[in-house]
Image (cartoon, rainbow, N blue to C red):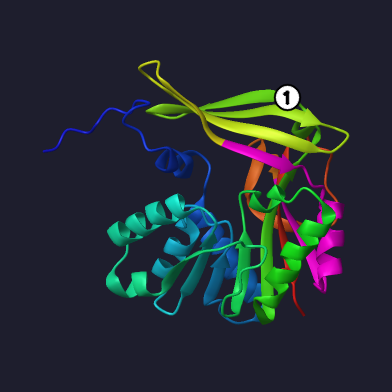
């Protein structure tokens, strides 16, 4: 039996750690599938994963059904090569043939039209001004089929405007979310992800994000300007019995002023 390698800053892969601590791929694949069916009374078969990084959503998507196809777009050649290696290791031949890894700018790149375009993990916040954000949303609109949906996520709450660090302990490592700086004049926010290990070693600034903290009203206004006909916000409710947020997200028009929240945004082309 091969002995499991102890996780340290030298032995760990930061993309694997990211998936374990941040990305909930199974939830997002299920959210796309169920939400599309609710809106259209039909199956979602094709997705485009913008700012795809390691393309975990696309990989899980083609595994979810033999009818599913995916286009994964990213500007970074290195991360796309990593994604290709991961796909080759985890996907069967048929599944691999149904995913296309494409180097390109998600703001301008054209692909065959799809049922759903997704931009999760707040990736579209790389656009710091309204003009660029609307341009990205217009490109998403162009790449959708007539009944297509654009799905995004966002976070906010008064803690989102603070400089703070939050740590989450896992078995072999600790995930550290570092809201390093925030400028209230521009709403520019710089965040880092660090990983700490049981031997005391650290991957400092494993990931760095230079974003604009967009509010939900601003995002909705930009989506409307780009041509989307309806925009819905999905948020978590409070489970009073278990004294915690529900795992499920519900369509809402009003919510409490929580210190921190995460929302999904569903924009319809029709």
Please state the horizontal and vertical placement of residue 136, each as a whole percent of the image: 72, 63
Which residue appears farthest toward the left when viewing the image?
Answer: 1
Please state the horizontal and vertical placement of residue 135, each as a whole percent of the image: 76, 64
* Quadrant holding the C terminus: bottom right
Residue visible at 59% across and 66% down? 32
Please state the horizontal and vertical placement of residue 240, each as a whole percent of the image: 70, 39
Residue visible at 40% across and 74% down? 98
Instruction: Tell whether position 223 is magenta.
Output: yes
Q: Is residue 252 visible?
A: no
* Quadrant holding the N terminus: top left
The magenta span reads 208-237
Q: Is residue 211 left or right of residue 48?
A: right
- Eyeballing the image, is 260 above or below 144? above
- Eyeballing the image, is 151 above or below 244? below
Q: Is residue 38 left or right of residue 73?
A: right
Please state the horizontal and vertical placement of residue 44, each as a whole percent of the image: 56, 76
193 or 172, nearer to the observer:
193
Q: In the rendered image, which residue does mark 1 sit on?
A: 163
């Amino acid at each position: 039996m091969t002995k499991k390698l102890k996780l340290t800053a030298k032995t760990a892969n930061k993309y694997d750690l990211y998936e374990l601590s941040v990305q909930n791929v199974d939830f997002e694949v299920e959210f796309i599938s169920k939400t599309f069916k609710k809106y259209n009374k039909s199956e979602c078969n094709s997705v485009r994963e913008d700012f795809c990084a390691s393309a975990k959503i696309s990989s899980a998507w083609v595994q979810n059904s033999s009818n599913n196809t995916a286009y994964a777009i990213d500007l970074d050649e290195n991360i796309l090569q990593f994604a290709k290696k991961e796909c080759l290791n985890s996907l069967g031949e048929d599944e691999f043939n149904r995913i296309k890894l494409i180097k390109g700018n998600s703001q301008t790149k054209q692909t065959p039209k799809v049922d759903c375009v997704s931009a999760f993990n707040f990736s579209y916040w790389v656009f710091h001004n309204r003009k660029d954000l609307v341009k990205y949303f217009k490109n998403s609109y162009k790449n959708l089929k007539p009944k297509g949906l654009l799905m995004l996520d966002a976070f906010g709450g008064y803690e989102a405007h603070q400089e703070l660090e939050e740590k989450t302990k896992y078995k072999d490592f600790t995930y550290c979310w570092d809201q390093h700086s925030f400028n209230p004049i521009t709403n520019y926010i710089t965040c880092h992800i660090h990983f700490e290990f049981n031997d005391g070693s650290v991957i400092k600034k494993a990931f760095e994000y230079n974003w604009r903290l967009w509010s939900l009203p601003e995002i909705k206004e930009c989506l409307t300007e780009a041509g989307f006909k309806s925009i819905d916000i999905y948020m978590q409710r409070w489970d009073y019995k278990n004294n915690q947020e529900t795992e499920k997200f519900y369509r809402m028009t009003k919510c409490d002023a929580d210190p921190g929240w995460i929302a999904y945004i569903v924009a319809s082309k029709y």
